[in-house]
Amino acid sequence: MTAVRLVILGRQGSGKGTQASRLVVAYDTVHISTGDMLRAAVGAETELGLQARAVMDAGELVGDDLINGIVAERLAQDDVAEHGFLLDGYPRTPDQASALEGFLAEAGTPMDAAVNLDVPVDEVTARMVARGRADDTAEAIRRRLDLYESETAPLLAWFAERGLLEVVDGLGAEDDVFTRLTTAIDRRLSVGDAS
Ligand code: AP5
Ligand code: MG
């Protein structure tokens, strides 16, 4: 199988991380979750982690320059060159989307698809409350969802303009959502092969 280059989009709590863990096995690719990378830095108490902790707990976004730097470094590693990537939680601002476009253009490796996991606000809120991560307080959840609408939702049009967007219903059993995702991704990959 050739290396895939995918982005998974969706509201906080839509199931990106849950599905990404399965998709990277199915497509033999590398899961790059900026949230997981930041939580690892917080846990290890690195300088980045110390900077990021308060921002994350409040549900605010970490600065674009910092995040773009972390992702650029990760994308430059050998496993990504060999296996491609599935980005989860990035890009989530217009500036991050432009930066990603720049990294991929420089590497000469175009993206295959951006898949949006569509789940309504009420359902994602219930899922996050039930999960109970450090940043799943009522206030931080509200702030993250507001930022999603203002900063991240516009990226759906951005990916659609580039012919990369697939929308998948994220409601229902995890297995059913997974099948919908692989169907959408496989369709994209076969179109890519034919052109
Ligand atoms: P991040 O870790 O990306 O968190 P998030 O965006 O809030 O998204 P989540 O991880 O909460 O949701 P998910 O879609 O992965 O859902 P999950 O699979 O867990 O970011 C955290 C913070 O880091 C940000 O707030 C920001 O501060 C910072 N950050 C990260 N990236 C950044 C960036 N690019 N720029 C700036 N700052 C950044 O599922 C949720 C729950 O639902 C789970 O309990 C799961 O078991 C359950 N579930 C999953 N699927 C189903 C289903 N089908 N039915 C029922 N329940 C389900
Ligand atoms: Mg996640």
Image (cartoon, helix red, strand yellow):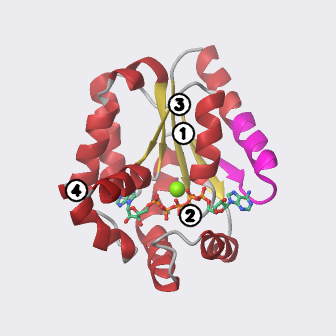
Q: Residue furthest front?
A: 44
Q: Return the residue at label 3.
A: 112
Q: Which residues are magenta?
A: 167-184
Distance between mark 2 and mark 1 Cα atoms: 18 Å
Mark 1 residue element: loop
Number of the front mark, 3 or 4: 4
Badge 2 marks a residue whose secondary structure is loop
Closer to the observer: label 1 or label 3?
A: 3
Disc 1 residue: CB within 8 Å of ligand 1: no
Of mark 1 and mark 3, the one earlier in the sequence is 3
Q: Which residue is mark 2?
A: 11
Q: Name the one closer to the observer, 87 or 160.
A: 87
Q: Is residue 38 above or below residue 144?
A: above
* Lateral position of residue 128 relative to residue 61, left or right: right
Query: Disc 4 marks which residue?
Result: 48
Mark toward the viewer: 2 or 4: 4
Q: Amino acid at mark 4?
A: Leu
- Residue 16, labelled with which disc? none
| Residue 90 seen anywhere in this rendered image of the structure | no
